[in-house]
Image: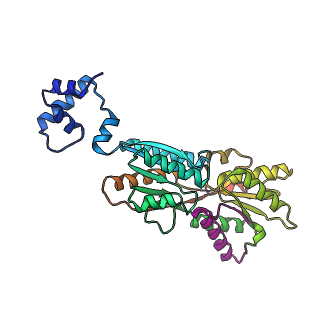
Amino acid sequence: MTSIKDVAAEAGVSVATVSRVLNEHPSVSEDARARVLAAVASLRYRPNAVARSLRTDQTHTLGLVISDVLNPYFTELARSVEEEARALGYSVIIGNADERPELQDHHVRTLLDRRIDGLLVSPTDGGSPLMLDAARAGTPMVFVDRWIPGVDVPVVRADGRGAVRDLVAHLHRLGHRRLAIIAGPAATTTGQERVEAFREALEEYGLELPDQYIGQGDFQAASGRRATERFLDLAEPPQVVFAADNLMALGALDAVRARGLRVPEDIALAAFDDIRWFVHTDPPITAIAQPTGELGRAAVRALVDRIEGRAPRSVTLPARLVVRRSCGENPATNRSQS
Protein backbone atom coordinates (compact mmCIF):
# COMPACT_ATOMS: atom_id res chain seq x y z
CA MET A 1 0.00 0.00 0.00
CA THR A 2 1.29 3.43 -0.96
CA SER A 3 2.21 5.58 2.03
CA ILE A 4 2.56 9.32 2.50
CA LYS A 5 6.35 8.79 2.56
CA ASP A 6 6.15 7.31 -0.95
CA VAL A 7 4.27 10.37 -2.15
CA ALA A 8 6.87 12.67 -0.57
CA ALA A 9 9.71 10.78 -2.24
CA GLU A 10 7.98 10.83 -5.63
CA ALA A 11 7.28 14.57 -5.38
CA GLY A 12 10.70 15.44 -3.95
CA VAL A 13 9.24 17.18 -0.90
CA SER A 14 8.95 16.50 2.81
CA VAL A 15 6.19 14.45 4.42
CA ALA A 16 5.04 17.64 6.17
CA THR A 17 4.60 19.36 2.80
CA VAL A 18 2.48 16.45 1.51
CA SER A 19 0.36 16.67 4.66
CA ARG A 20 -0.15 20.41 4.19
CA VAL A 21 -1.23 19.92 0.57
CA LEU A 22 -3.67 17.16 1.47
CA ASN A 23 -5.16 19.32 4.23
CA GLU A 24 -5.38 22.33 1.88
CA HIS A 25 -3.05 24.45 3.99
CA PRO A 26 -2.31 27.77 2.27
CA SER A 27 1.40 27.91 3.16
CA VAL A 28 2.54 25.72 0.23
CA SER A 29 4.02 27.00 -3.04
CA GLU A 30 2.07 26.32 -6.22
CA ASP A 31 5.01 24.34 -7.61
CA ALA A 32 5.16 22.05 -4.56
CA ARG A 33 1.38 21.66 -4.54
CA ALA A 34 1.38 20.66 -8.22
CA ARG A 35 4.16 18.08 -7.69
CA VAL A 36 2.40 16.56 -4.69
CA LEU A 37 -0.93 16.28 -6.48
CA ALA A 38 0.79 14.74 -9.51
CA ALA A 39 2.49 12.19 -7.24
CA VAL A 40 -0.82 11.40 -5.51
CA ALA A 41 -2.44 10.74 -8.89
CA SER A 42 0.50 8.74 -10.22
CA LEU A 43 0.76 6.50 -7.15
CA ARG A 44 -3.02 6.36 -6.63
CA TYR A 45 -2.53 7.34 -3.02
CA ARG A 46 -5.60 7.46 -0.77
CA PRO A 47 -5.21 9.27 2.57
CA ASN A 48 -6.19 7.40 5.73
CA ALA A 49 -9.48 9.09 6.64
CA VAL A 50 -9.37 8.02 10.28
CA ALA A 51 -5.85 9.27 10.88
CA ARG A 52 -6.62 12.44 9.01
CA SER A 53 -9.67 13.13 11.16
CA LEU A 54 -7.56 12.81 14.31
CA ARG A 55 -5.23 15.51 13.01
CA THR A 56 -7.88 17.91 11.72
CA ASP A 57 -10.58 17.18 14.34
CA GLN A 58 -12.99 16.66 11.44
CA THR A 59 -14.41 13.40 10.13
CA HIS A 60 -16.34 14.79 7.13
CA THR A 61 -19.24 12.70 8.38
CA LEU A 62 -22.80 13.85 9.07
CA GLY A 63 -25.37 12.11 11.23
CA LEU A 64 -29.01 11.83 10.14
CA VAL A 65 -31.69 10.66 12.57
CA ILE A 66 -35.01 10.11 10.81
CA SER A 67 -38.33 9.32 12.40
CA ASP A 68 -39.22 6.15 10.47
CA VAL A 69 -37.13 4.54 7.74
CA LEU A 70 -40.18 2.52 6.59
CA ASN A 71 -42.05 5.73 5.79
CA PRO A 72 -41.45 6.46 2.07
CA TYR A 73 -41.28 10.18 2.80
CA PHE A 74 -38.29 9.73 5.11
CA THR A 75 -36.70 7.19 2.77
CA GLU A 76 -36.72 9.77 -0.01
CA LEU A 77 -35.51 12.45 2.38
CA ALA A 78 -32.57 10.28 3.46
CA ARG A 79 -31.64 9.61 -0.14
CA SER A 80 -31.53 13.30 -1.02
CA VAL A 81 -29.49 14.04 2.13
CA GLU A 82 -26.94 11.36 1.22
CA GLU A 83 -26.65 12.57 -2.38
CA GLU A 84 -26.14 16.23 -1.43
CA ALA A 85 -23.69 15.36 1.34
CA ARG A 86 -21.62 13.24 -1.03
CA ALA A 87 -21.53 16.08 -3.55
CA LEU A 88 -20.15 18.36 -0.82
CA GLY A 89 -17.51 15.87 0.33
CA TYR A 90 -19.31 14.37 3.34
CA SER A 91 -20.50 10.88 4.24
CA VAL A 92 -23.74 10.19 6.15
CA ILE A 93 -24.54 7.78 8.98
CA ILE A 94 -28.29 7.17 9.35
CA GLY A 95 -30.20 6.25 12.50
CA ASN A 96 -33.85 5.16 12.44
CA ALA A 97 -35.84 6.35 15.47
CA ASP A 98 -38.95 4.32 14.54
CA GLU A 99 -41.05 7.17 16.04
CA ARG A 100 -39.64 6.33 19.50
CA PRO A 101 -38.02 9.15 21.53
CA GLU A 102 -35.75 6.77 23.47
CA LEU A 103 -34.43 5.22 20.24
CA GLN A 104 -33.93 8.69 18.77
CA ASP A 105 -31.77 9.66 21.75
CA HIS A 106 -29.81 6.42 21.47
CA HIS A 107 -28.89 7.28 17.87
CA VAL A 108 -28.07 10.90 18.71
CA ARG A 109 -25.78 9.80 21.56
CA THR A 110 -24.05 7.19 19.39
CA LEU A 111 -23.48 9.63 16.54
CA LEU A 112 -22.04 12.28 18.83
CA ASP A 113 -19.72 9.68 20.36
CA ARG A 114 -18.46 8.89 16.87
CA ARG A 115 -17.38 12.51 16.45
CA ILE A 116 -19.58 13.39 13.51
CA ASP A 117 -19.13 16.93 12.22
CA GLY A 118 -22.83 17.77 12.36
CA LEU A 119 -26.29 16.37 12.98
CA LEU A 120 -29.56 16.41 11.02
CA VAL A 121 -32.61 15.39 13.07
CA SER A 122 -36.33 15.04 12.48
CA PRO A 123 -37.41 15.04 16.16
CA THR A 124 -39.92 12.44 17.37
CA ASP A 125 -40.99 14.84 20.12
CA GLY A 126 -40.11 18.22 21.59
CA GLY A 127 -38.75 17.19 24.96
CA SER A 128 -35.44 15.40 24.42
CA PRO A 129 -32.97 16.69 27.07
CA LEU A 130 -30.10 15.15 25.08
CA MET A 131 -30.86 17.15 21.96
CA LEU A 132 -31.49 20.29 23.96
CA ASP A 133 -28.10 19.89 25.65
CA ALA A 134 -26.38 19.18 22.32
CA ALA A 135 -27.88 22.30 20.76
CA ARG A 136 -26.92 24.48 23.73
CA ALA A 137 -23.39 23.06 23.66
CA GLY A 138 -22.97 24.36 20.12
CA THR A 139 -23.15 21.06 18.24
CA PRO A 140 -23.71 21.88 14.56
CA MET A 141 -27.32 20.79 14.11
CA VAL A 142 -30.24 21.32 11.74
CA PHE A 143 -33.84 20.20 12.25
CA VAL A 144 -35.50 18.85 9.11
CA ASP A 145 -39.26 18.42 8.58
CA ARG A 146 -39.99 18.66 12.32
CA TRP A 147 -38.47 20.92 14.93
CA ILE A 148 -38.34 21.69 18.66
CA PRO A 149 -39.93 25.08 19.41
CA GLY A 150 -37.71 27.48 21.32
CA VAL A 151 -34.44 25.76 20.39
CA ASP A 152 -32.07 28.00 18.43
CA VAL A 153 -31.35 25.58 15.60
CA PRO A 154 -31.98 26.18 11.87
CA VAL A 155 -35.12 24.44 10.60
CA VAL A 156 -35.66 23.18 7.05
CA ARG A 157 -39.29 22.27 6.47
CA ALA A 158 -42.31 22.50 4.21
CA ASP A 159 -45.22 24.82 4.95
CA GLY A 160 -48.36 22.77 4.39
CA ARG A 161 -50.93 25.34 5.50
CA GLY A 162 -51.56 26.71 2.02
CA ALA A 163 -51.89 23.22 0.56
CA VAL A 164 -54.30 22.19 3.34
CA ARG A 165 -56.44 25.25 2.54
CA ASP A 166 -56.37 24.22 -1.12
CA LEU A 167 -57.44 20.70 -0.17
CA VAL A 168 -60.38 21.87 1.94
CA ALA A 169 -61.48 24.28 -0.81
CA HIS A 170 -61.27 21.40 -3.29
CA LEU A 171 -63.35 19.12 -1.04
CA HIS A 172 -65.90 21.87 -0.48
CA ARG A 173 -66.31 22.35 -4.26
CA LEU A 174 -66.95 18.62 -4.56
CA GLY A 175 -69.83 18.98 -2.07
CA HIS A 176 -68.19 17.40 0.99
CA ARG A 177 -69.17 18.92 4.33
CA ARG A 178 -68.35 16.28 6.96
CA LEU A 179 -64.56 16.13 7.02
CA ALA A 180 -62.47 14.11 9.48
CA ILE A 181 -58.72 13.99 10.13
CA ILE A 182 -56.36 11.31 11.36
CA ALA A 183 -53.82 13.40 13.25
CA GLY A 184 -50.19 12.67 13.94
CA PRO A 185 -48.72 12.62 17.46
CA ALA A 186 -49.50 15.79 19.40
CA ALA A 187 -45.88 15.77 20.67
CA THR A 188 -44.60 16.51 17.15
CA THR A 189 -44.75 19.91 15.51
CA THR A 190 -46.08 18.43 12.27
CA GLY A 191 -48.78 16.55 14.17
CA GLN A 192 -49.97 19.79 15.79
CA GLU A 193 -49.59 21.99 12.73
CA ARG A 194 -51.61 19.83 10.34
CA VAL A 195 -54.60 19.60 12.67
CA GLU A 196 -54.51 23.37 13.28
CA ALA A 197 -54.28 24.09 9.54
CA PHE A 198 -57.18 21.72 8.80
CA ARG A 199 -59.38 23.25 11.50
CA GLU A 200 -58.60 26.81 10.33
CA ALA A 201 -59.35 25.91 6.72
CA LEU A 202 -62.70 24.37 7.70
CA GLU A 203 -63.62 27.53 9.63
CA GLU A 204 -63.18 29.57 6.45
CA TYR A 205 -66.15 27.65 5.04
CA GLY A 206 -68.20 27.73 8.22
CA LEU A 207 -67.47 24.07 8.93
CA GLU A 208 -66.58 22.59 12.31
CA LEU A 209 -64.17 19.85 13.29
CA PRO A 210 -65.99 18.00 16.09
CA ASP A 211 -64.00 15.80 18.45
CA GLN A 212 -65.49 12.62 16.99
CA TYR A 213 -63.98 13.57 13.63
CA ILE A 214 -60.43 13.75 15.04
CA GLY A 215 -58.63 10.42 15.13
CA GLN A 216 -55.37 10.18 17.03
CA GLY A 217 -52.64 8.47 15.04
CA ASP A 218 -48.90 7.96 15.29
CA PHE A 219 -47.80 8.37 11.64
CA GLN A 220 -47.97 4.59 11.15
CA ALA A 221 -50.46 2.45 9.22
CA ALA A 222 -52.06 0.57 12.13
CA SER A 223 -53.21 3.81 13.75
CA GLY A 224 -54.78 4.89 10.46
CA ARG A 225 -56.78 1.65 10.37
CA ARG A 226 -57.96 2.05 13.97
CA ALA A 227 -59.00 5.67 13.55
CA THR A 228 -60.91 4.94 10.33
CA GLU A 229 -62.72 1.97 11.89
CA ARG A 230 -63.89 4.32 14.65
CA PHE A 231 -65.07 6.88 12.08
CA LEU A 232 -67.03 4.19 10.21
CA ASP A 233 -68.76 3.10 13.43
CA LEU A 234 -70.22 6.58 14.04
CA ALA A 235 -73.94 7.13 13.60
CA GLU A 236 -73.01 9.79 11.03
CA PRO A 237 -69.62 8.87 9.54
CA PRO A 238 -67.56 11.56 7.81
CA GLN A 239 -67.74 11.98 4.06
CA VAL A 240 -63.96 12.43 3.85
CA VAL A 241 -61.03 11.10 5.87
CA PHE A 242 -57.88 13.22 5.63
CA ALA A 243 -54.87 11.30 6.90
CA ALA A 244 -52.02 13.51 8.11
CA ASP A 245 -49.37 11.24 6.60
CA ASN A 246 -49.06 8.60 3.89
CA LEU A 247 -48.80 5.47 6.06
CA MET A 248 -51.93 6.39 8.02
CA ALA A 249 -53.69 6.94 4.68
CA LEU A 250 -52.81 3.41 3.58
CA GLY A 251 -54.12 2.11 6.92
CA ALA A 252 -57.35 4.05 6.35
CA LEU A 253 -57.70 2.53 2.89
CA ASP A 254 -57.29 -0.95 4.39
CA ALA A 255 -60.04 -0.25 6.94
CA VAL A 256 -62.48 0.95 4.28
CA ARG A 257 -61.88 -2.09 2.09
CA ALA A 258 -62.17 -4.47 5.06
CA ARG A 259 -65.76 -3.20 5.52
CA GLY A 260 -66.57 -3.93 1.89
CA LEU A 261 -66.81 -0.20 1.18
CA ARG A 262 -65.43 1.73 -1.77
CA VAL A 263 -63.36 4.89 -2.15
CA PRO A 264 -64.67 7.43 -3.08
CA GLU A 265 -68.23 6.12 -3.58
CA ASP A 266 -68.81 5.33 0.10
CA ILE A 267 -66.17 7.52 1.74
CA ALA A 268 -63.49 9.82 0.29
CA LEU A 269 -59.81 9.73 1.25
CA ALA A 270 -57.01 12.29 1.08
CA ALA A 271 -53.50 12.32 2.51
CA PHE A 272 -50.63 14.52 3.57
CA ASP A 273 -47.21 13.38 2.20
CA ASP A 274 -47.67 12.22 -1.36
CA ILE A 275 -45.79 9.06 -2.35
CA ARG A 276 -45.20 7.37 -5.68
CA TRP A 277 -47.47 4.47 -4.73
CA PHE A 278 -50.54 6.72 -4.54
CA VAL A 279 -50.82 6.96 -8.32
CA HIS A 280 -51.05 3.15 -8.47
CA THR A 281 -53.78 2.63 -5.86
CA ASP A 282 -57.38 2.14 -6.95
CA PRO A 283 -58.43 4.90 -7.03
CA PRO A 284 -55.28 7.05 -7.13
CA ILE A 285 -55.14 9.09 -3.92
CA THR A 286 -55.47 12.87 -3.77
CA ALA A 287 -52.59 14.09 -1.61
CA ILE A 288 -50.48 17.00 -0.43
CA ALA A 289 -46.94 16.70 -1.77
CA GLN A 290 -43.91 18.06 0.04
CA PRO A 291 -40.75 19.02 -1.91
CA THR A 292 -38.89 16.19 -0.20
CA GLY A 293 -35.74 16.15 -2.31
CA GLU A 294 -35.33 19.91 -2.04
CA LEU A 295 -35.79 19.73 1.74
CA GLY A 296 -33.04 17.14 2.10
CA ARG A 297 -30.61 19.07 -0.05
CA ALA A 298 -31.35 22.37 1.68
CA ALA A 299 -30.88 20.75 5.10
CA VAL A 300 -27.43 19.46 4.16
CA ARG A 301 -26.36 22.83 2.79
CA ALA A 302 -27.51 24.57 5.97
CA LEU A 303 -25.61 22.10 8.13
CA VAL A 304 -22.41 22.33 6.08
CA ASP A 305 -22.62 26.13 6.28
CA ARG A 306 -22.74 25.79 10.07
CA ILE A 307 -19.84 23.33 10.15
CA GLU A 308 -17.66 25.42 7.86
CA GLY A 309 -18.22 28.67 9.73
CA ARG A 310 -20.83 30.31 7.53
CA ALA A 311 -24.14 31.60 8.86
CA PRO A 312 -26.83 28.97 8.23
CA ARG A 313 -30.44 29.96 7.72
CA SER A 314 -33.79 28.29 8.15
CA VAL A 315 -35.62 27.32 4.95
CA THR A 316 -39.37 26.96 4.43
CA LEU A 317 -40.66 25.58 1.14
CA PRO A 318 -44.30 25.33 0.02
CA ALA A 319 -46.20 22.05 -0.24
CA ARG A 320 -48.77 21.58 -3.01
CA LEU A 321 -52.04 19.78 -3.61
CA VAL A 322 -52.03 16.89 -6.09
CA VAL A 323 -55.57 16.11 -7.27
CA ARG A 324 -56.35 12.55 -8.32
CA ARG A 325 -59.59 10.53 -7.92
CA SER A 326 -60.01 9.43 -4.28
CA CYS A 327 -62.38 12.26 -3.33
CA GLY A 328 -64.89 11.89 -6.16
CA GLU A 329 -63.05 14.02 -8.71
CA ASN A 330 -63.81 13.91 -12.41
CA PRO A 331 -60.59 12.63 -14.03
CA ALA A 332 -61.07 15.01 -16.96
CA THR A 333 -60.92 18.05 -14.69
CA ASN A 334 -57.97 17.10 -12.45
CA ARG A 335 -55.62 20.05 -12.07
CA SER A 336 -52.48 18.17 -11.08
CA GLN A 337 -51.38 14.62 -11.78
CA SER A 338 -48.27 12.66 -10.85
Say which of 219 and 109 sits in front: 109
Q: Is residue 297 magenta?
A: no
In the rendered image of this protein, does residue 3 appear above or below residue 16? Answer: above
Res. 178 in view: no
List x then y, in percent, for residue 174. 73, 65
Q: Quadrant of the N terminus?
A: top left
Residue sitting at the far bottom: 206
List x then y, in percent, for residue 293. 50, 49
Residue drawn at 46 percent across, 66 percent down:
151
Residue drawn at 64 percent across, 73 percent down:
200
List x then y, in percent, for residue 166. 62, 66
Residue drawn at 48 percent across, 58 percent down:
131
Q: Is residue 44 left or right of residue 35?
A: right
Res. 29 in view: yes
Residue drawn at 71 percent across, 50 percent down:
221
Q: Is residue 122 left or right of residue 36?
A: right
Say which of 269 and 38 sits in front: 38
Q: Is residue 47 left or right of residue 279?
A: left
In the rendered image of this protein, does residue 43 appear above or below residue 200? Answer: above
Magenta residues span 180-208
What colour scheme governs how the chains and residues are painted in the rendered image of this protein?
rainbow
List x then y, in percent, for residue 211. 75, 71
Residue 162 placement: quadrant: bottom right
Q: Is residue 199 left or right of residue 307?
A: right
Q: How many marks?
A: 0
Say which of 300 and 338 sits in front: 300
Residue 3 placement: quadrant: top left
